Image: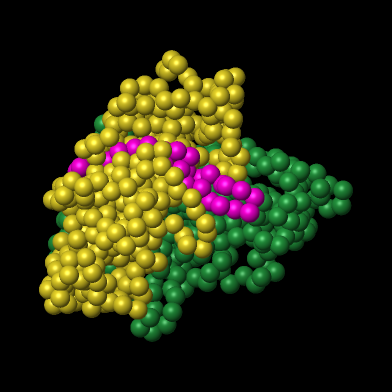
Chain colours: A green, B yellow
């Protein structure tokens, strides 16, 4: 990831994106003024607590929900306001993997993949069946199970089907929204390894949304930390995890228990809970839970400031803390 | 047979009666929880850890037919030992929610949505301690303050839907703790919570445990939580405990291949090892999936997924090996 507005090698370029839900008093600004760009071949992690707007951002960048303000460019082409038919060829290139793959319980899984190929006019005629079998093998499933129904598969296998469905369209860019959260530990590791393998063999670019910092550190090249719709910090993975700068990032990392009793126990740095997104605090949205907040923090919304190579932080008190 | 343990579970077997026969889901497990101690029960979904908790509490769903065998011995504050499986329901009710309390993963489904939280908490002290409404209210309010709910006075009159997930779990804890139980069974209490809230809740539980000296049976799938919040751990797989010991021992000198597999598939653990060794440690998954509980294996239930599986594993049931302080259910003699 680089600073916005740079080069053509960007798969995705997002500038000053805002997404809002509701009207009047019930208006919620789920994503506020977010800029980011993802280069081809990168895996960018989007982390934050529930309500931080990470899923909303993930959906907005592939035009699944309307944008209030800002710009989203996919391979240099602006995607907002495109009609359904104009969107379709782009849709093929940008796919999504969901937490719950939501498979149609009455459709055979082979037919499900067939439908994707049919919609996009891929692998017609005699090539269709071999391609479906190939997709099954790609995600580690037995092609003989193509005539089965979703309920005949386990949780991990359903997630593999969800991945196969996304891959059927031969995308370049995938938004993976908490693809591991519903899975057991041993199955999570299987899916993580599958995603890493597919990414390198197919040359995918992935926006990986997760609340699990350990997984993000393992999978991603670059991480964006969100809080109440705002980006708090963004940095290359190793930098973010070894030298976090933003108080929120530090608190998140300190709260996650390391599975080793020899390591220090998790600390409670953050007290209380995130404020309601319907009435976010003035200035820095994190200030109500921040240990270092001063009056100044309530006056201005901190802008993302470049602190190093591809490392930006939104905090005005950074030099003092 | 008179041990010091607050809870000792001996050869507990829970089966579901079906038309086709018995479906054995908890397959003979033994463990003890000492006073003031936290025992973590770890396992993946379907391993039988929640069912174990529900069997102990005698809260198994009434819309199915269950069979519980073995012994669940609970020692109350007078030192009397009760076998919870054979107690009359009436006596069980005086213990449940009073001497033995339980909290669940999703507090929203456990709290009554149409009764204020203050009323729900005070109900328990009225029932078990025979307090009148006003002193019950006072003690419910104290309980809310004890679990660090801000503006407790105001929250007292609110309904569950007005609270956040973390607050609801605090209410559940207040409700469980109000009668000062000897034993708290916590079934995945922080799984649905964000990591910062999880840290708060776990800290709160540790503080309350220290204050009251209660024992805790902590059910979780999160080994990070186990590492820092339990003294001993029992690992469950397919209805059996496969390894049991002190947390430090089990993490440092893991015996059972399943436990080893679980630790190797944690990205956080891989990261920790990479930092120590300076080399990238790959994430090793456990191939395959947990076996169907309808089949009773002739050998070790983990054998089909085990890297170290050999002939004997498929043929005969493994026996406990190692010292009582740290044992595992495995055929492997020498372990690396």
- The quarter of the picture where the N terminus of chain B appears is top left
Query: Residue B226: which quarter of the image?
Result: top left
Report if residue B261 is visible in the image: no
The residue positioned 72% from the left and 60% from the top of the image is: A107
The x, y position of residue B290, in whole percent, is 55, 40
Q: Which residues are magenta?
A: B12-37
Q: Name the foreground residue: A13 vs B3.
A: B3
The residue positioned 18% from the left and 57% from the top of the image is: B180
Residue B32 falls left or right of residue A41:
left
Q: Is residue A127 above or below residue A104?
A: above
The x, y position of residue A262, in whole percent, is 26, 31
Q: Name the foreground residue: B276 vs B168.
A: B168
> Overall secondary structure of the magenta stretch?
strand
Most distant residue in the right direction: A126
The x, y position of residue A190, in whole percent, is 54, 39
Report if residue B335 is visible in the image: yes
Q: Name the foreground residue: A91 vs B189.
A: B189
Q: Is residue A96 above or below residue B108?
A: above
Q: Name the foreground residue: A296 vs B124.
A: B124
Residue B331 falls left or right of residue A286:
right
Q: Is residue A245 above or below residue A59?
A: above
Membership of B22 in magenta stretch = yes
Q: How many numbered circles are shown? A: 0
Residue B159 falls left or right of residue B20:
left
The residue positioned 71% from the left and 62% from the top of the image is: A106
Q: Is residue A94 above or below residue B45?
A: below
The x, y position of residue A185, in whole percent, is 47, 42
- The quarter of the picture where the C terminus of chain B appears is top left
Query: Residue A30: which quarter of the image?
Result: bottom left
């Amino acid at each position: 990831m680089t600073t916005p507005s740079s080069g053509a090698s960007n798969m995705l370029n997002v500038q000053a994106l805002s997404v809002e839900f509701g009207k009047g008093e019930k208006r919620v600004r789920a994503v506020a003024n977010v800029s980011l760009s993802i280069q081809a071949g990168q895996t960018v992690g989007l982390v934050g607590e529930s309500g931080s707007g990470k899923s909303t951002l993930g959906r907005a960048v592939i035009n699944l929900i309307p944008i209030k303000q800002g710009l989203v460019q996919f391979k240099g082409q602006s995607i907002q306001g495109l009609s359904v038919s104009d969107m379709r060829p782009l849709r093929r290139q940008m796919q999504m993997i969901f937490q719950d793959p939501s498979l149609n319980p009455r459709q055979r899984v082979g037919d499900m993949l067939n439908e994707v190929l049919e919609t996009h006019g891929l692998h017609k005629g005699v090539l269709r069946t071999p391609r479906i079998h190939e997709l099954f093998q790609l995600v580690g499933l037995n092609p003989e199970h193509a005539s089965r129904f979703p309920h005949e598969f386990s949780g991990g296998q359903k997630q593999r089907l969800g991945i196969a469905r996304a891959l059927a369209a031969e995308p370049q860019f995938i938004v993976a929204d908490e693809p591991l959260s519903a899975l057991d530990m041993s199955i999570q590791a299987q899916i993580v390894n599958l995603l890493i393998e597919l990414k390198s063999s197919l040359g995918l670019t992935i926006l990986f949304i997760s609340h699990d910092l350990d997984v993000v550190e393992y999978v991603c090249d670059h991480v964006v930390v969100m809080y109440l719709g705002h980006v708090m910090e963004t940095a290359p993975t190793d930098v973010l995890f070894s030298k976090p700068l933003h108080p929120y990032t530090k608190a998140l990392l300190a709260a996650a228990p390391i599975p080793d009793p020899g390591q220090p126990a998790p600390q409670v740095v953050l007290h209380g809970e995130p404020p309601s997104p319907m009435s976010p605090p003035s200035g820095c949205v994190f200030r109500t839970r921040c240990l270092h907040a001063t009056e100044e923090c309530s006056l201005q919304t901190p802008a993302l400031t470049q602190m190093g190579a591809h490392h930006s932080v939104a905090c005005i008190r950074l030099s003092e803390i | 047979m008179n041990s010091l343990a607050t809870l000792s579970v001996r050869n507990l077997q829970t089966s579901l009666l079906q038309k086709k026969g018995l479906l054995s889901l908890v397959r003979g497990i033994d463990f003890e929880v000492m006073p003031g101690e936290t025992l973590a029960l770890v396992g993946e979904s379907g391993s039988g850890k929640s069912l174990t908790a529900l069997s102990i509490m005698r809260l198994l769903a009434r819309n199915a037919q269950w069979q519980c065998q073995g012994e669940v011995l609970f020692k109350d504050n007078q030192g009397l030992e009760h076998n919870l499986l054979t107690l009359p329901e009436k006596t069980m009710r005086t213990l449940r929610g009073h001497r033995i309390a339980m909290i669940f993963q999703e507090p929203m489904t456990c709290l009554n949505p149409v009764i204020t939280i203050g009323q729900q908490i005070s109900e328990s002290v009225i029932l078990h301690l025979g307090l009148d409404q006003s002193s019950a209210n006072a003690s419910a309010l104290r309980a809310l303050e004890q679990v660090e709910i801000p503006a407790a006075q105001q929250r007292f009159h609110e309904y569950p839907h007005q609270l956040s997930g973390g607050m609801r779990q605090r209410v559940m804890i207040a409700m469980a703790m109000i009668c000062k139980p000897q034993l708290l069974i916590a079934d995945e209490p922080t799984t649905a919570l964000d990591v910062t809230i999880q840290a708060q809740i776990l800290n709160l539980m540790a503080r309350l445990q220290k204050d009251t000296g209660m024992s805790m049976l902590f059910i979780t799938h999160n080994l990070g939580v186990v590492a820092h919040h339990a003294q001993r751990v029992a690992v469950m797989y397919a209805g059996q405990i496969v390894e049991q010991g002190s947390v430090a021992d089990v993490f440092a000198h893991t015996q059972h291949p399943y436990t080893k597999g679980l630790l190797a598939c944690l990205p956080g653990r891989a990261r920790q090892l990479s930092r120590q060794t300076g080399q990238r440690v790959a994430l090793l998954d456990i191939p395959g999936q947990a076996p169907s509980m309808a089949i009773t294996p002739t050998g070790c239930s983990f054998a089909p997924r085990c890297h170290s599986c050999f002939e004997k594993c498929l043929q005969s049931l493994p026996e406990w090996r190692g010292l009582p302080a740290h044992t595992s259910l495995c055929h492997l003699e020498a372990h690396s």
